[in-house]
Structures are given as structure tokens and as C-alpha cells.
């Protein structure tokens, strides 16, 4: 009995011990499922699948007393395990690997992660970031800069300048030869188109050359065609209104007093302006030279806000002679701006003996030269001359005229009164009318003496045309032509 009991006990113990091992080895095998009661979640056969749909997952690892199974092996026997310690790293845990020669393996006695295996190396800077010492792990990808001690490089720039064109600005491109840094900076504005007109041709219409057409070319190849007609600029003697738009004086050295040294004493231009005078027509000179008070008068009148025109007194007695006078006048005009026309004063007694045709040609020659050079050339003459000494119709059709007439029949206009009802009574209204040469009072009772005019009297004029607006819009007389013009690209 004792022996039998002992043998039974041994058998029973063996059975208990072998249960998990038997089970562990037979997953998927033909070995009967000895633990079916507690392992209902481990269906193992087609029969289980056919008879039950309660479970759908199949676990891939299983804890046993030997640890976690990592390989089922292929034999159904009592495993004989050998142990091997797998050391941990910084990224994988260590463990004891239990292996049977059948291939069965488990993993047990996990060992936690260990620290990184650190090493250091010097890292070069870049153009924008510090270099220094990098600590890194030789096992994993961990790394960290522990010292920023090497200053960044500066960019190694390579400059490329794209030159400005008519429409594109100059761009300087800075590329780094070390990194991919690139920077574009506008370093000069676009050039803008510059149309150059052909040399040696008249660019502005004149009485002699009334239709102008030419093509100007830009450096970029763009072209514009300019077509100008004399009638677009100059409208002839007559104006279609008798409404006075401005009141003016004409001034020469005769209006100036002199001191004991013979120097001219300037006028009180501000007082002239304040009296209600809108403009002055200054004598600029003659073939004898520049009028000695012209520069002083021009500066004073401009400073006071008066609009300014000028006149040139002609002594010429031939077309060649008056052409030379025009050349001289052009030198006097340089650098000045005139809101009113540049007048040819044609009334010298030496010219009375000439033929009408010659006088007419002389006027056309002189004013055409002035006009072609960008000045609003016009004619000053007395009414008698206008009617008797020229080809009147031709002159009147070609030029703005400033006409002098002081009497109508025996009636002389009141020289001291600005009367807006005054209208030249004759063949038409001229651009400007000089209606008296004997005024002693300006506007509003201001006397000529009170503004420094030494001569007992002064000329007074009515203007019927808005010359300042016209001349500025044309870009004549030293003014810059406004951007909006009549030219068109072709
Ligand atoms: Zn085994
Ligand atoms: Zn590591
Ligand atoms: Zn760089
Ligand atoms: Zn261009």
C-alpha cells in the first residue's frame, strides 16, 4: 500500500507539472486539449470554429511559468530549457531567453532599459547656426548639442546684378555659395522709357512748318509716333471771347528810377500784385542786348506770384537779320519760365520803309524759330501796323496778337480805369489788348508812384485768353509737359 500510494503520488505530481507543458507544446497540434475547461478562449481546432463563434482572437503570446512564449517549437514533449541572459540596451529591455532544442523559447526575468551609450563629436557650424559639441548615443538615434561654441559662418555671398530696364528695376541677387540662402533686393528703380526723337528735324510745329510727324525710339525698341499740328497749339490773332480774363502791365527799364550811382531801384512787385494786377509782360531785350532790369524784374515778379511774359524789340530790316535776333532771344530765354507768350515787338521806325511782304516774312521767320524751340511766340504790334504794314489776314491767321490801340476815333479810353466793358472795337478780339500807355493808377486806386514806378505812367493791358493754363498744358515756355500727352505708342 505504501509503495502503491507513493507511485500514485508521483504520477499525480507528474501529471500536474506536465499539464501546462503539454498544453504549451501542442497548440495547433493533434494533442488533445487537456485544459479545455479553462481555456475556452483558445479554440484550437476546426471543430471549435465550427461549433462556436464566441471567440475571434488568437493570442500570440502566452505567459507560462517559464516566461512569455516567443516560439512554440515543434515538439510535444517535456522541454529541456537552457538559459541565456540577453543584456538590455537603451532601447530594448534585457531578459532571460529560455530555449529548448525543439525550438521552444520563452522570455523571462525582464531587465529594464539601461542608459544611452554616449559619445561626443564636434559639429561644424552652418551659415546661420552655431557649431559645437554634439553628444550622441552609439546605439540609438539620440543626440543633443551640449555646447554651442563655434560661431556660425557668415554667408559666402555671390552677387549677381540684373540691370534695370525701362520697366524692370535693377535687382541685386545675393546667393550663398555655402548654403541655399538667396536674397533679391531692388537696388535701383526702373529706367522708364526714354524716347529719343530723330536729330535734325523740327519737333514742334511752327508757322513755317505747321504739320509735324516723327517717330521716337526708346532703348528698349519701343517707339512712339508724334503728330502735332500748328493749329492744335496756336490759334491765331482772334479769340472767341471779349471777356477779360486777366489784367496786366508791360514793364521795361523806363519804369525804373535810378539811384545816384545809376543803379535801377527795384519795383514793389508785391504791391503791384496786391493791387489786383495778374501779370506783367517784361521787356527781355533787343539786338542791343538784354534789358538791364529784366533779371531783377523777372525775379521780383515771380516771387510776388505774378504771371510773367516777355517781349523782344526788333530793329531788324531783313529776314536774315531778324533770324539772328531770334537766335539771340533764344539765349536770353534759357532757364526761364513764362506763363504768357514770348512776343515779338515789331514797330521800329526803321522797318517802316520795308515792303509788306518782307515784314510779313520777317515775322513768320522770327516767330517760327521761337515756336520750334518750344516757346509760345506771338506778335505785338499797333493796330495801324497790323492793318497796313503786313499781310494782315495771314498774320492774323497764324499768330496770337497783342494789339495796341489807345483811341477809338477821337475817344481815348480812360487810362486809369479798368472797365470790364472795354472791348476793342474793330475787326475782332485779339488775345491781348494794350489799351493805354498813360496809366497812373493800377487797380484799386494804387498809384504807379506807390509801387516804385518812376515813369509818370505805365501801359495797361487786357487779356482775353487763359495763357497760363494753355502754355503750361502744352509744356511750352520752359514748363514741363504734363505726363498725359497726345503721343501714342506704335
Ligand atoms: Zn522542447
Ligand atoms: Zn541610446
Ligand atoms: Zn550661407
Ligand atoms: Zn523703353
Image: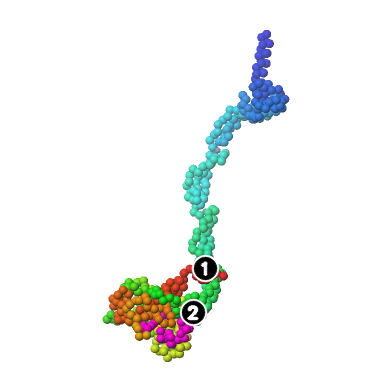
Q: Is mark 1 within 8 Å of ligand 4?
A: yes
Element marked by disc 1: loop
Q: Please state, as top left, top right, bottom left or bottom right, where the N terminus lies in the image.
A: top right
Residue matched to label 2: 206
| Foreground residue among 140 and 49 | 49
Q: Residue at x 35, y 83 (%)?
A: 411
From this viewpoint, is residue 46 visible? yes
Q: Residue at x 47, y 88 (%)?
A: 357
270 drawn magenta: no
What is the x, y in percent for residue 426? 41, 82
What is the x, y in percent for residue 337? 41, 74
Q: Residue at x 57, y 39 (%)?
A: 139
Magenta range is 383-408
Q: CA distance from mark 2 to mark 1?
A: 27 Å
Q: Residue furthest bottom?
A: 353
Q: Residues within 10 Å of mark 2 (few under 14, many from 20)?
A: many
Q: Is mark 2 within 8 Å of ligand 4?
A: no
Q: Mark 2 or 1 closer to N-term? A: 1
Q: Please state, as top left, top right, bottom left or bottom right, where the C terminus lies in the image.
A: bottom right
Residue matched to label 1: 193
Amino acid at each position: 500500500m505504501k509503495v502503491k500510494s507513493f507511485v500514485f503520488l508521483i504520477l499525480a505530481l507528474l501529471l500536474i507539472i506536465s499539464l501546462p507543458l503539454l498544453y504549451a507544446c501542442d497548440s495547433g497540434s493533434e494533442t488533445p486539449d487537456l485544459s479545455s475547461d479553462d481555456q475556452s478562449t483558445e479554440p484550437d481546432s476546426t471543430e471549435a470554429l465550427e461549433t462556436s463563434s464566441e471567440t475571434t482572437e488568437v493570442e500570440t503570446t502566452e505567459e507560462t511559468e517559464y516566461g512569455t512564449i516567443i516560439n512554440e517549437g515543434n515538439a510535444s514533449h517535456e522541454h529541456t530549457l537552457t538559459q541565456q541572459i540577453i543584456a538590455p540596451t537603451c532601447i530594448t529591455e534585457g531578459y532571460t531567453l529560455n530555449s529548448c532544442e525543439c525550438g521552444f523559447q520563452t522570455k523571462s526575468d525582464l531587465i529594464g532599459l539601461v542608459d544611452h551609450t554616449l559619445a561626443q563629436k564636434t559639429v561644424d557650424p552652418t551659415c546661420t547656426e552655431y557649431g559645437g559639441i554634439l553628444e550622441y548615443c552609439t546605439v540609438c538615434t539620440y543626440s543633443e548639442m551640449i555646447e554651442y561654441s563655434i560661431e556660425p559662418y557668415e554667408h559666402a555671398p555671390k552677387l549677381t546684378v540684373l540691370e534695370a530696364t525701362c520697366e524692370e528695376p535693377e535687382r541685386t541677387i545675393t546667393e550663398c555659395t555655402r548654403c541655399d540662402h538667396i536674397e533679391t533686393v531692388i537696388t535701383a528703380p526702373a529706367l522708364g522709357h526714354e524716347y529719343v526723337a530723330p536729330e535734325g528735324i523740327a519737333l514742334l510745329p511752327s508757322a513755317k512748318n505747321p504739320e509735324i510727324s516723327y517717330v521716337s525710339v526708346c532703348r528698349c525698341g519701343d517707339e512712339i509716333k508724334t503728330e502735332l499740328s500748328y493749329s492744335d497749339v496756336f490759334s491765331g490773332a482772334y479769340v472767341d471771347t471779349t471777356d477779360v480774363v486777366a489784367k496786366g502791365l508791360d514793364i521795361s527799364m523806363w519804369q525804373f528810377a535810378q539811384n545816384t550811382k545809376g543803379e535801377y531801384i527795384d519795383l514793389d512787385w508785391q504791391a503791384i500784385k496786391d493791387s489786383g494786377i495778374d501779370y506783367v509782360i517784361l521787356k527781355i531785350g533787343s539786338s542791343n542786348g538784354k534789358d538791364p532790369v529784366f533779371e531783377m524784374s523777372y525775379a521780383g515778379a515771380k516771387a510776388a506770384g505774378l504771371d510773367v511774359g516777355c517781349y523782344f524789340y526788333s530793329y531788324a530790316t531783313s529776314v536774315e537779320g531778324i533770324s539772328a535776333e531770334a537766335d539771340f532771344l533764344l539765349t536770353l530765354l534759357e532757364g526761364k519760365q513764362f506763363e504768357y507768350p514770348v512776343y515779338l515787338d515789331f514797330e521800329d521806325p526803321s522797318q517802316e520803309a520795308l515792303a509788306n511782304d518782307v515784314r510779313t516774312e520777317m515775322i513768320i521767320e522770327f516767330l517760327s524759330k521761337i515756336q520750334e524751340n518750344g516757346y509760345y511766340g506771338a506778335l505785338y504790334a499797333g493796330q495801324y501796323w497790323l492793318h497796313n504794314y503786313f499781310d494782315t489776314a495771314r498774320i492774323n491767321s497764324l499768330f496770337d496778337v497783342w494789339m495796341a490801340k489807345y483811341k477809338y476815333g477821337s475817344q481815348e479810353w480812360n487810362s486809369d480805369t479798368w472797365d470790364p466793358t472795354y472791348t476793342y472795337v474793330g475787326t475782332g478780339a485779339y488775345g491781348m489788348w494794350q489799351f493805354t500807355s498813360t496809366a497812373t493808377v493800377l487797380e484799386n486806386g494804387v498809384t504807379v508812384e506807390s509801387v516804385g514806378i518812376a515813369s509818370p505812367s505805365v501801359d495797361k493791358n487786357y487779356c482775353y485768353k487763359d495763357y497760363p493754363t494753355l502754355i503750361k498744358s502744352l509744356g511750352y515756355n520752359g514748363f514741363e509737359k504734363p505726363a498725359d500727352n497726345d503721343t501714342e505708342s506704335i
